[in-house]
Image (spheres, helix red, strand yellow):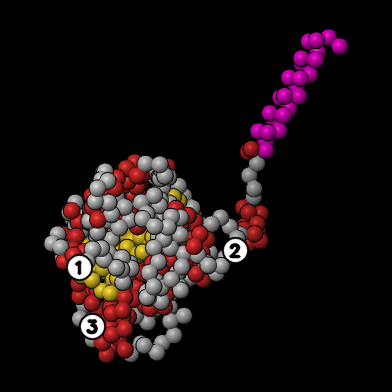
Amino acid sequence: MPAWKSFVGLLALAGGAVSCAHHGDTEVVPEHEREELLKKWDQEWSFTGIASFAHLKPVKCLIEPSENYDIAVIGAPFDTAVSYRPGARFGPRAIRAASARQMSGTSFNTRAGINPYKSWAKITDCGDIPITPFDNGLAERQMYEAFLELGSRKTVNAAPKGGDSIGTGHPKLVTLGGDHSVALPALRALHQIYQKPITVLHFDAHLDTWNPVRYSAYWQSEQTQFNHGSFFHKASREGLICNSTSAHAGLRTRLTGVDAGDYTNPGPEQGFIRIHADDIDELGPMGVVETIIQRTGLDPEQPVYLSVDIDVLDPSTAPGTGTPEPGGWTTREFIRILRGLEKLNLVGADIVEVSPAYDNKGETTALAAAQVAFEIITSMVKSGVKEDLGGWYGHLYDDATAGQTEAESDVTRDEL
């Protein structure tokens, strides 16, 4: 066969292939067929699907500048500022997996009278910040820029009660850590966004206001200043925190040296009030809530950052953490405290120090962290709802001085 005939034949075959491909690309599935497919297959179980938080639509928000939301869930897989056991870089993945039973159709929160995933707020899992594990200075910068970018986006829906709060127009950020040092770049970003010191409510077994020189008095460098036990010290010195309204809760740590200098040495980092873990024996969960609210206040013009180190819980409940301390709160006690704080003006939160390598077979640490995130998100959503939705705790704290008698009326109610 002449060469030119072979060439023409090949061209004809190629043209046919292109024509078929083009035809396939432009084929449109009829709407009735699509609806039938959705009815048949558009269903997820708690154990199926991509592991996003609570089966929320996962979006890499940092590379999608047009993606807006009202609440963003962000992973901060960073753990190279720890002083004891590492592994919290795997925390975001573990918390997301543990949130699998939180689905939009089955997440009505009876204590709050609201399903946070089916209310006014668009909640998005924005994926993880790609944080270097090789350079802590660079990691600080990466996290700060990411939090600033994500927290500066426009909101999607106007909260019904939005006009009453300083947070109007700014999305709320919920960070899954990561070690606790991730709170420092988050506070820097929030301070930049809100242009005022932030009230911090800090749940932890440890102070995290230690002067970094106590970690290494001789071998000092810029990076020794950045660790998961000194970030609130740095934040206070930088003027990021409103120390006259901030609080530590759940403390049971040992101190350095031979005296109480970690508590009593003067400095802005000691402006927090301290609620110790065993104070709950006398106060009860609602007494802890009252003490916190009396400290933080309920000023709608004062932004509040809620920081939760999972080691606030007892190691029998949450063993999967880097620096466990015996004598902590139970999951039930802590959740009840969180449920009493729904009127705080939360602009951001973190759940940190989940280190799944040390968790048990039942993954109770990650499960607790996922539930903590759910309670925080619920409170963020409910704070934007104008009408009284009721719920078990909706009437308890109409002001910061609610009486103990009123709180006691709910003591026997089932919280599950």
Q: The N terminus lies in which quarter of the figure? A: top right
Callout 2 secondary element: loop
Residue 16 is at least partly visible in this image: yes
Secondary element at image label 3: loop
Circle 2 residue:
47
- Amino acid carrying mark 2 in the image: Phe
Viewer-side residue, 321 vs 33 = 321
Give the quadrant of residue 12.
top right
The x and y percentages for residue 271 are 17, 64
Quarter assignment of residue 335: bottom left
Q: Residues within 10 Å of mark 2 (few under 14, many from 20)?
A: few
The numbered mark, 2 or 1, whose residue comes first in the sequence reads 2
Q: Position of residue 44 (x, y in %)?
A: 59, 62
Q: Which residues are magenta?
A: 1-24
* Picture disc at residue 402: 3
Magenta: main secondary structure: helix
Query: Going by the image, does 244 lie left or right of 315?
Result: left
Q: What residue appears at the point 25 percent right and 45 percent down from the top-left corner?
A: 220
Residue 70 visible in the displayed image:
no
